[in-house]
Amino acid sequence: MNVRVAVTKNFKREAKRFLKKFASLKRELFELKEKLMLNPPLGTSLGLNAFKIRLAVQSKGKGKSGGLRVITFLDTEIIGIVEQETNKVTKVYLLSIYDKSEIETLTQKELRELIENIEEV
C-alpha cells in the first residue's frame, strides 16, 4: 500500500502553539507519522473516514488520557489498473490537533467543516 501523510493548514496553525509549549511534541508527531504510514486507520473511527488518535505528550506528563488529540482523514485514490493489479494511494490528512483539557471532542458539524476545507501546506 502506498501511503502519504499530508499536513493541512488548519493542523499546522493549531500545532504551532503546542510545539512551542511541549518540547517533545515534534518527535512524537514524527513517530505518529511513521505509525500512520504503516496503519492509516489508526485511532477511533469518527465516521466520514475520519479518526481520532490519542497522543501522549511526554513533556506534558499526563499520558494518553490527558494528552493531545489528533484528527485524521483518509482519502484513497485508485491510480490505474494494469492487468489485474490495482495501485492505490492512501492520503492521510492531519486535520486538527487539540488538548483534551480544552476541548472534549469535535461535533459532527465541526468534523464536516474540517473535511470540506482541506488545504495542504
Image (cartoon, rainbow, N blue to C red):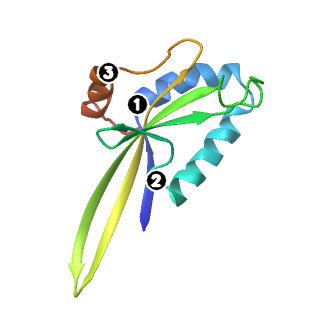
Quadrant for the N terminus in the image: bottom left
The image quadrant that residue 84 belongs to is: bottom left
- Using the rendered view, name the quadrant where residue 54 is placed: top right
Which residue is denoted by mark 3 in the rendering?
Answer: 110
- Pointer 1: what residue? 9
Per the image, label 1 sits on a secondary structure element best described as helix
Q: Nearer the viewer, residue 79 or 45?
A: 45
Q: Which residue is mark 2?
A: 40
10 Å crowding of disc 1: few (<14), some (14-19), many (20+): some
- In the rendered image, the residue lying farthest to the bottom is 83
Label at residue 111: none
The earlier-in-sequence mark between 1 and 2 is 1
Q: Residues within 10 Å of mark 3 (few under 14, many from 20)?
A: few
Residue at image point 74% right, 28% down? 23
Residue 92 pos. (x, y %): 41, 48
Q: How far, Cα to Cα, is label 1 from label 2?
A: 20 Å
